[in-house]
Amino acid sequence: MSHTHARTAVIALGGNALAPSGETSTIYDQFRHTRESLGPIVELALAGWSVCIVHGNGPQVGDELVRNEVARGEASPLPLGVLVAATAGWIGYMIQQSIENALLRAHSPRSVATVITQVQVDPTDPALRNPTKFIGRALTQKRARELQAEGHVVKTDGNGKLRRVVGSPAPQGIRELAVIKLLVEQGMLVVACGGGGAPVYEHPTLGWEGIDAVVDKDLAAAVLARDLGAELLLILTDVDAVYADWGTPEQRPLRQLTVDEAVAMDEAKAFGEGSMAPKIRAAVDFVRRTGGRAIITSLSHGQQAVHGEAGTTITGTTVTTVTRETA
């Protein structure tokens, strides 16, 4: 079943969608949240779209670090790059199984595959020397001192908690692009770039080597969407739209943004650096390079957003109204 000429959508699913903040999610909770998050994905699949799903792993990789810490006397800890690949495996399994069950119920013959993905980064990226991405849980003063003695960087997050921070280099390319493309052209739904992908760099003599960092999953999704020639980048997060004057009594959702408007707001520091700003930059990069459209919305509004009825749609310099017939 070839879908070579089908429209392609890349859907970026936040790790918090599967393990909401403020909730200590067991794996059973995460399976439930995964099943609940699939509406827009399944709808696009049943409408004949080619679909790639990129997911985050912030809460999950944090839990893996805790397991490493607790068991370090019994089992050798795994490096961060390996933990990214590990979480991409089991989160991919949850998403894959949940989509398969939804497609079976809808009597769809389409299949799902998870590709553990390596994402190329620049080993001289300044982000590696200036760690800013918080991972893992809050640390005690004692544990923070121990980690710092081991060479890890610890900073205080926005909630005043001591946490590990790691470098988050910009994604340059997807190593498994040819494999993903082949699967998409055969009509498969593909889970790829899990957790932003395992970051790798090209070593002059050893070839591809892993690096201990975390790639932003929205930026990785934008690179994947660009290189697949996707028409749609759908970023599902925990807010229903991009807001102007966020956090003030004047806050209001923005339904349409041109690339120029989004860039101007970003330059005016209108977006949270650790939250909305990377999503806006990913959307802008994708739209600029492809002429496609990007939508930022919450999980629960994903289906309406595809039809232009919810969320924030970011387009080129001219805004086009999307109707249900063309969505």
Image: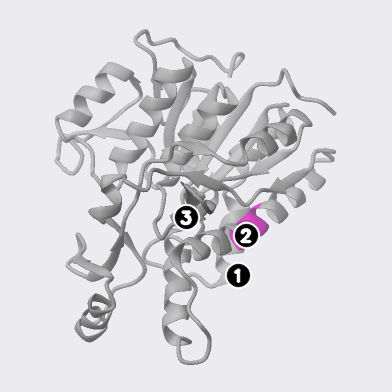
- Residue 206 visible: yes
Give the vertical position of 45 relative to 57 (above or below): above
Relative side of 8 to 79, left or right:
right
Q: In which quarter of the image is residue 317?
A: top left
Coordinates of residue 292 in the picture (x, y in percent)? 49, 18
Q: Quadrant of the C terminus?
A: top right
Vertical arrangement, residue 256 with respect to residue 320, above or below = below
Residue to which mark 3 is pinned = 15
Q: Which residue is drawn at 44% across and 36% down?
A: 172
- Kind of residue at badge 1: Tyr
Q: What stretch is highlighted in magenta?
A: 90-95
Q: Which of 106 and 133 is in front in this view?
A: 133
Confirm whether the magenta stretch covers residue 272. Answer: no
The numbered mark at residue 28 is 1
Q: Quadrant of the N terminus?
A: top right
Determine which residue is flagged by label 2.
89
Q: In this view, does 145 lie to the left or right of 73?
A: left
State how far apart marks 2 and 1 are (Cα).
16 Å
Marks 2 and 3, how far apart at CA = 14 Å
**Earlier along the polypeptide chain: callout 2 or callout 3?**
3
Identify residue type, mark 2.
Answer: Gly
Among the 4 quarters of the image, the one containing residue 248: top left
Instruction: Point out the tag, 2 or 1, that comes first from the N-terminus.
Output: 1
At mark 2, the secondary structure is helix
148 left or right, relative to 259: left
Magenta segment, principal secondary structure? helix
